[in-house]
């Protein structure tokens, strides 16, 4: 019987194929699946919206005076994030007239799961988004 090669190279044996056809196709599929990287050629590209974001909020009362008009808070990432370098970290204003606006805040990695974030206005709440 014939093997059909699917869009990203997986091999589909025909119904009724016996071991001499089925097992080599199974082995090829296992090797292909082990090497795929979701870059669009050997497997479908990952859509960024498909990645579930995790969030946390820094309340205005959490900011500590640093120096030169800066305020700092030390953040521990939510459970399930084992390395912040493997995530995109975004910040949004979570209060006041700018609620929902993205902001570019400086942050410094301390450990795999903690970082310091800096702001120049301690009166705002900030939503942290991990992707």
Image (cartoon, rainbow, N blue to C red):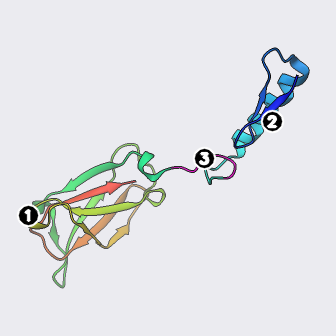
Asked which secondary structure carries label 2, the reply is: helix
Q: Which residue is mark 1?
A: 96
Is disc 2 surrounded by few (<14), some (14 to 19) or many (20+) residues within 10 Å? some
Q: Is residue 66 above or below residue 44?
A: below
Residue name at image x 40 percent, y 53 percent: 131
Q: Is residue 93 above or below residue 35?
A: below
Residue name at image x 17 percent, y 77 percent: 120
Q: Mark 3 or mark 2, which has the lower sequence index? A: 2
Tell which of 12 and 85 is nearer to you: 12
Q: Picture quarter containing residue 94?
A: bottom left
Q: Mark 3 or mark 1, which has the lower sequence index? A: 3
Image coordinates for residue 108, horizontal then vertical, percent: 36, 70
Q: Picture quarter containing residue 113?
A: bottom left
Q: Is residue 44 a member of the stretch shown in magenta?
A: yes
Image coordinates for residue 48, horizontal then vertical, percent: 45, 53
Q: Which residue is mark 2?
A: 28
Is disc 1 surrounded by few (<14), some (14 to 19) or many (20+) residues within 10 Å? few
Magenta span dominant secondary structure: loop
Image coordinates for residue 117, horizontal then vertical, percent: 28, 67
Magenta segment: 41-46
Q: Is residue 24 a member of the stretch shown in magenta?
A: no
Q: Nearer the viewer, mark 3 or mark 2?
A: 3
Q: Which residue is mark 3?
A: 44
Kindly indicate whether the residue at mark 2 contacts the one at mark 3 (C-beta within 8 angstroms).
no
Q: Mark 1 or mark 2, which has the lower sequence index? A: 2
């Amino acid at each position: 019987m014939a093997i059909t090669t699917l869009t990203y190279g997986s091999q589909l044996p025909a119904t009724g194929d016996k071991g001499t056809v089925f097992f080599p196709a199974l082995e090829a599929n296992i090797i292909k699946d082990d090497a795929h990287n979701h870059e669009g050629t050997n497997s479908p590209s990952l859509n960024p919206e498909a990645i579930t974001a995790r969030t946390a909020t820094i309340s205005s009362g959490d900011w500590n005076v640093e120096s030169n008009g800066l305020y700092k808070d030390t953040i521990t990432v939510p459970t399930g994030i084992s390395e912040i370098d493997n995530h995109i970290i975004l910040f949004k204003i979570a209060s006041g007239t700018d609620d929902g606006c993205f902001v570019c805040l400086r942050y410094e990695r301390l450990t795999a799961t903690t970082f310091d974030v800096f702001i120049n206005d301690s009166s705002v709440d900030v939503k942290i988004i991990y992707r």
